[in-house]
Image (cartoon, rainbow, N blue to C red):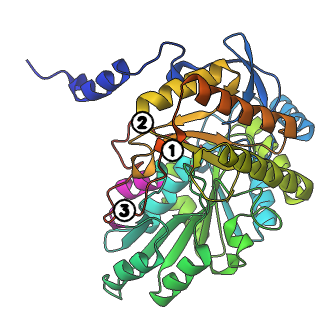
Amino acid sequence: MSADLFNKFDPVFKARAEQPVDRADPFKVCMDEVLSETEAMIDGRHTILAGTNNYMGMTFREEAIEAAHKAIDAFGTGTTGSRVLNGTYAGHRILEDALRDFYGTEHAMVFSTGYQANLGIISTLAGKDDFVIIDADSHASIYDGCALGNATVMRFRHNDVADLDKRLGRIPPEAGKLVVIEGIYSMLGDKAPVSKIIAICKKHDAAIIVDEAHSMGFCGESGRGVAQAEGVEGDVDFIIGTFSKSVGTVGGFCVSNHPKFEVLRLVCRPYMFTASLPPSVVASAAKSIELLKYAGNRRAHLWENARRLHSGLKEAGFVLGTETAESPIIAVCLPDMPTTTRFWAELLHAGVYANMAVPPATPQGLNLLRCSVCAAHKPEQIDQIIERFIRVAEILALNLSETRRGGATAEIAAHPQAPGAAAATG
Ligand SMILES: Cc1ncc(COP(=O)(O)O)c(C=O)c1O
């Protein structure tokens, strides 16, 4: 008799069985009602949402909802096909125009998710004789883009410019090289040294992709991301992003000024062989992107909220993923997985929803309660989140000094979202 194909997942069943889920199961949370960008009813309780990635609070923008309604009335519920065969609707063109306008680039290509944008762009650009060099803390979609392609894959230590330089130096000079980084890293909310990395790429004649999934909307003067904030956008070959965070809906994209960019529509399989986004989604995404360009006040408010949460938790003694608020992602480090699960469940019971992020989906094996703040949070809500964190720490009699942020790893041991990581989030 052949082996049960599910045997390989026994460690996952075992780990789940060992979780102290006396109060709630992190994998079974259901928002029965979403009251606003910042509040939902979960299990009959009024809950503050502190883990949505809805950074700019666009999910309930009237203009975006109205655009979605109009599109669904005019074009129906779906395209029922890929862009290449039968799936380009007027709305896709309008959305790509909105992206070109937002980023000031010649080209924009919309994918059905950000995951697919990384899958498609990385696997298509880097071919058999090429090299892809990625940050060790890259998102699963970047790892999977490498796995789908045929290039040689190398990793450099997280945000370590010298290590990148060393590794690029080992590649034959004539080989094609593609470096992939993120503007803000999704688990700890730390920022990449984008301009320094670009200088190294230039030294070695390597092309660069910056995935601005967690920086679009609020980094840089008009919200284009970290590359804009550092004044180096002109040197980035490809920006990848998602509509599932600051844009408030679903979908992904790549923008570029490369003169041959459009050929990707004919050769990029994760673009060609999947249905295009539905009319309502593209309409609301286009409207949100238009609004994000001029959302200076929201950006300022989001940063105020991020700093308020960071300083409040830090003053209370929590160990955080970054020394200062480098982004709206504020990650609270906890000592071990059982404590993290219990803390998460108590916090939910107290009316705060944050993300539980644990190994292998986290860098350096950290156990995290990952918060992401929203421009629509009121200062009082941020204060309530802080108070409830403190209350739960007291309930659990937690010794906060036992936690660690983790230090520089000697080797690249952590590859958090490489294939095999069972529950990657963010
Ligand atoms: C850095 C990064 N890139 C890409 C993605 C994928 O985005 P999407 O949700 O649109 O598939 C994510 C999602 O969390 C991400 O964190």
Residue 83 drawn in magenta: no
Determine whether the residue tagged by mark 3 lies in a helix, strand or loop. loop
Give, as a three-letter code, the residue at label 1: Ser
Q: Nearer the viewer, residue 275 or 357?
A: 357
Q: Nearer the viewer, mark 3 or mark 1?
A: 1
Q: CA distance from mark 3 to mark 1?
A: 21 Å
Q: Earlier in the sequence, mark 3 or mark 1?
A: 1
**Residue 27 drawn above or below residue 286:** above
The quadrant the N terminus occupies is: top left
Q: Residues within 10 Å of mark 3 (few under 14, many from 20)?
A: few
Q: Which quadrant of the view contains residue 411?
A: bottom left
| Number of dots carrying numbers | 3
At x 69% / y 75%, what residue is drawn?
A: 233
Task: Please state the extent of the stretch shown in magenta in the rendering.
Answer: 142-155
Determine whether the residue tagged by mark 1 lies in a helix, strand or loop. helix
At x 59% / y 49%, what residue is drawn?
A: 320
Q: Which mark is residue 401?
A: 1
Residue to which mark 2 is pinned: 336
CB contact under 8 Å: marks 3 and 1:
no
